[in-house]
Image (tube, rainbow, N blue to C red):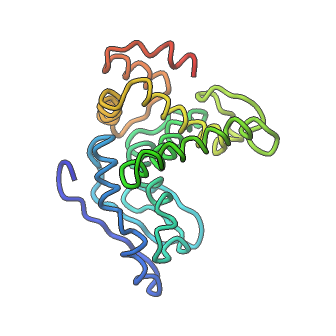
Amino acid sequence: GIDEDIPIEIWVRPNDSSNVDNAFAKLHEITAILENSYGPYRWDRIGYVGTGIGAMEHATNIAYPNGSINGSLGSESLYTHELAHMWFGDNVTCSSAEEMWLNEGWAVFTEALYREFIYGKETYNEYIRDLHADVIQFCHTPGRDGSYFPLNQIPQEITYGMSAYDRGATIAHSLRGYLGDDVFFDAMAGYNEHFKYNYASSYDMRDFLSSHTGIDLAPWFDNW
């Protein structure tokens, strides 16, 4: 890690133990990508534990479905998503459920980001384009989120819908494009340092990024 060695522990059922090395083959590389993008990893260890169903970002002990520990790279995006929450969600938590994009949108954005640094920029672009197309076509429709919402005012009944996850990721991507990589990644590392072990709102993010970068981001946040 940037600051120190980071121990990794992965706990699985005995029958799954032979699948761990291949399933998590790029975990070291992905951790380095996240540290270089968002600042140092702040917890005592990286931990995953196999569970019967579902995934959840418990700090140092991420719940991870047994079916994804299958010896393939098919769930690489999922374990990256949960690891991203060690920065967005666990280190800095959204100030309310209505602002869940600050947790989940940034984790989905990280699913795109790791692809860029491991598999190439076009793979990143393709992932973002697919998200963008789905958001435009489906996010507002019945059966999905059902309407258009400001990202900081998502109704609690759709806290875990497309607005927070997929639309949030496309907005993070747009912010990256607006600021440029050097400013963007420096600013997001600064954000994680400034609000570490605390919570933040979209307005807190706006005000910090404006101060940190010297760029007035109020118009950008108002528009998006």
Q: Nearer the viewer, residue 14 or 127?
A: 127
Q: Is residue 151 left or right of residue 15?
A: right
- Looking at this view, name the residue that lies furthest to the right: 142
Picture coordinates of residue 197 (x, y %)? 35, 40
Quarter-wise, where is residue 60 in the image?
bottom left
Residue in view at x 73 percent, y 38 percent: 137
> Which residue ends up furthest to the bottom in the rendered image?
15
| Camera-side residue of 68 and 55 | 68
Q: Residue furthest front?
A: 122
Name the residue nearer the viewer: 134 or 58.
134
Quadrant the C terminus occupies = top right
Residue 64 location (% of width, % of height): 50, 66
State the residue at coordinates (46%, 55%). Answer: 82
Residue drawn at the location 46% of the way across and 28% of the way down:
175
**Is any atom of residue 61 visible in this view?**
yes
In the rendered view, would you say 24 is above or below 217?
below
Relative to 16, does residue 196 appear above or below in the rendering?
Answer: above
